[in-house]
Image (tube, coloured by chain):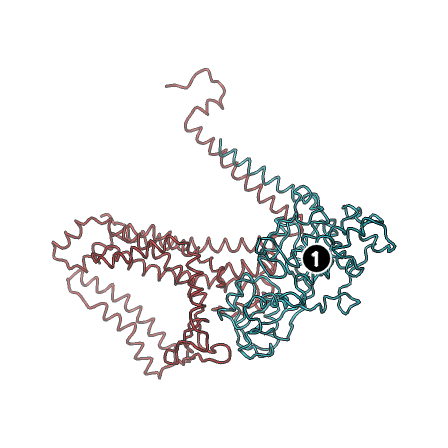
Amino acid sequence: MSTPTSNTNPLLRAWYNKEARSIIVQIIAAALIISFFAYVINNAVVNLTAIGKDIDFGFLWQNASYDINQHLIEYSSTSNHFTAMIVGLINTLLVAGAGIMLATILGFILGVMRLSNNWLTQKIAYVYIEYIRNVPVLLHILLLHGLIVSSLPRPKGSFNFGDVFFLNNRGFQLPSPDFQSLFWIVGAFVIAGIAFAWWFGHHAQKVQDETGKAYPVAMINIAAIVLLPLVVYFVLGSPIEWDVPALKGFNFKGGMVIRPEFIALWLALSFYTAAFIGEIVRAGIVAINHGQTEAAQALGISNSRTLKLVVIPQALRVIIPPLTSQYLNLAKNSSLALAIGYMDIVATIGGISLNQTGREMECMLIVMAIYLAISLLISSVMNWYNNRMQLVER
Amino acid sequence: MKLINKVLTGVALTAMTATAAQASTLEDVRAADELKCIVTTGLAGFAAPDANGRWEGFDADFCRAVAAAVLGDGDKVQFVPTTGKTRFTMLNSGEGDILFRNTTETLSRDADLKLSFLPVNFYDGQGFMVPAALGVTSASQLDGASVCIQTGTTTELNLADYFRANGMSYEPVPIETNEEGFTNYVAGRCDVYTTDASGLASTRAKFDDPTQHVVLPEIISKEPLGGAVRHGDDQWFDIGKWVVNALINAEEMGITQANAMNLAANVGNNPGINRLVGSEGNMGEMLGLDAKWAARAIAQGGNYGEIYERNVGPNTPLEIARGLNALWNQGGVLYAAPIR
């Protein structure tokens, strides 16, 4: 088939050429999209100027003037909005990080339970997953927060665990460590222990590969990382003093507190995401051909080693990519903190700072950029891990 | 081509919104035949929907008065409920035409948030409420307490200042709405609830037994509450400003909900009253309205005193005495500029 000769117009001829047409369409689409955004941004700037507002990030260095209950770095109402933002960011990272950890553990347990031969175990996991993942996570957060705040006793009637730990509707109060001057020695031993464990792991692997001789790697490494520093700790005369919380007036003074807002958000996000991870793990394990297990058994490999050396490494290849998107969901869902007053990045710079300074555009841009950065970070870590787990073809 | 169509429609729509924002607010309100009034999500006595879903309260009545003056019908109001955090954005983005939402007038809100404040219609101050069982009698005993505060309010800043100035510590428990604050306070998540004294009175009235809760004597801030409009439309600002002034002047002159329309129909002996109700002079015309604007606003919900007594006064569950909110010649500070 040749193009009709009657079309002498070069534009029309280009249109009939498949490759040229695709390029033309792409150029038009790109131009339209760019001009649309240019128009919207220009419009926003013009409208902001019309009411006398410019885009200026200078407000970040002004006094924030408000207090934040949970701050892991030094913060007071005399700190600036930038510090408030960092406090919020740390709170977001804290709940997202803790959530990812708990969700992963719970998710793997659920996934394995779903495949259990035990009828009850399997049904419990099934009911849990179907209930949790079919109710919006916001409701889980509100429900948990309501439960903690309404059903736990007030500070005066706290559940007392040996006068050291206390649980009430203001949170979980626990002692905080106060490191003495000699504590750095213990820290140094821990770091040295980790370094040794890393080297020893490699060395043991090499020896085993060459000679087939297996060292008790786990035992030796635990001794290096935990036992030795512990001995050093006691030899130095316990260089940590514990600040134990005590009821004084309205609240507990001293120690640390894990607030109900954090607990509710952390548990709700973890429970919710765990339901999805459970299904992903189940899918990953089911995807491994049963012949693999049978082959391993035929070679006389024990059940636990079959799981560890044959099934899980292969299942991980199926599990990791969807797991990444669950981690991203969890990190982004943490912005629902707003509903119960957990002071995350949205509540600080995207909430109170925004409201007190009236810098909506700037604050929202900052919050968006931060979430984007967090998500990209999670993605790149997971991609790196995924690449490591990929099938190495020899 | 469907996508291109969509994009073009989008562009056209954005362009329309842009032009709409530049037209005068009065024209917009008239064109829509409806006043979009920004109120709270629910604070009994100030603005809250009643059992039939009709918004009632002090702020709601001011919304209706403005609608009556501008559109001739006090029921042509679309109430836009907002939290403390969203209210100014809603106003500045044009989601509302005017704001009556227990809002404190401050310099930064005026200059930086680009709002124009109407005359103060409620003089308030921030207070503390605690359960009577705690035995607290003064705010100076609140060291170490957990305090529920609404975020995005001046309250939050006053609280930080107050505790810092007095060398006391506290745990802020941030909440979004008055309702949420109530729930957290009842559950004991916080020991203290702080907001404007009027808001405390409103919240306290909701308890089965209000005597179980005490409002502490300290008032830690000045909270002049008033309506607000966007910067940049002086005509609309003037309308809002003079409706408020008209209602206050009406109380001073004895013009009430019952007699306003009668007074407007006949030219009386008192030139001040005549000018206000529009039987003499062209006050309404100067504002871009008709002569009977103020008469209608008063006939809608009554003068300032009537609005106050009906919604928050001593005979309501809120039991707030007139205090500072009495007229200047009756021991208060309400002193409205004359209509002439």
Q: Nearer the viewer, residue A23 or A94?
A: A94
Residue at the outermost top position: A6
Residue B142, image quadrant? bottom right
Q: Is residue A24 left or right of residue B51?
A: left
Residue B150, above or below A362: below
Q: Residue at x 69, y 55 (%)?
A: B62
- The picture places residue A390, in percent across and down from the top left corner, at 28, 50
Amino acid type indicated by mark 1: Phe
Locate residue B298, reporting x and y percent: 74, 54
Query: Residue B131 at x, y = what percent?
Result: 54, 74
- Residue at the spot of label 1: B117
* x and y, in percent, of residue A76 in the image: 55, 70
Q: Residue furthest right?
A: B269
| Rendered-image quadrant of the C terminus of chain B | bottom right
Instruction: Compare residues A46 and B320 and report the one nearer the observer.
Output: B320
Q: How many marks?
A: 1
Classify mark 1: residues with Cα within 10 Å, few (<14), some (14-19) or many (20+): many
Residue A346 relative to residue B338: left or right: left
Colour cyan, chain: B
Relative to A345, residue A2 above or below: above
Instruction: Identify the image quadrant of residue B128.
Output: bottom right
Chain corresponding to red in the figure: A
Q: Nearer the viewer, residue B26 or A305?
A: B26
**Does B322 sit left or right of A12 as displayed?**
right
- Tag 1's secondary structure? strand
Residue at the (28%, 56%) spot, across then down:
A111
Q: The numbered mark 1 sits on a residue in which chain?
A: B
Picture quadrant of residue A206 = bottom left
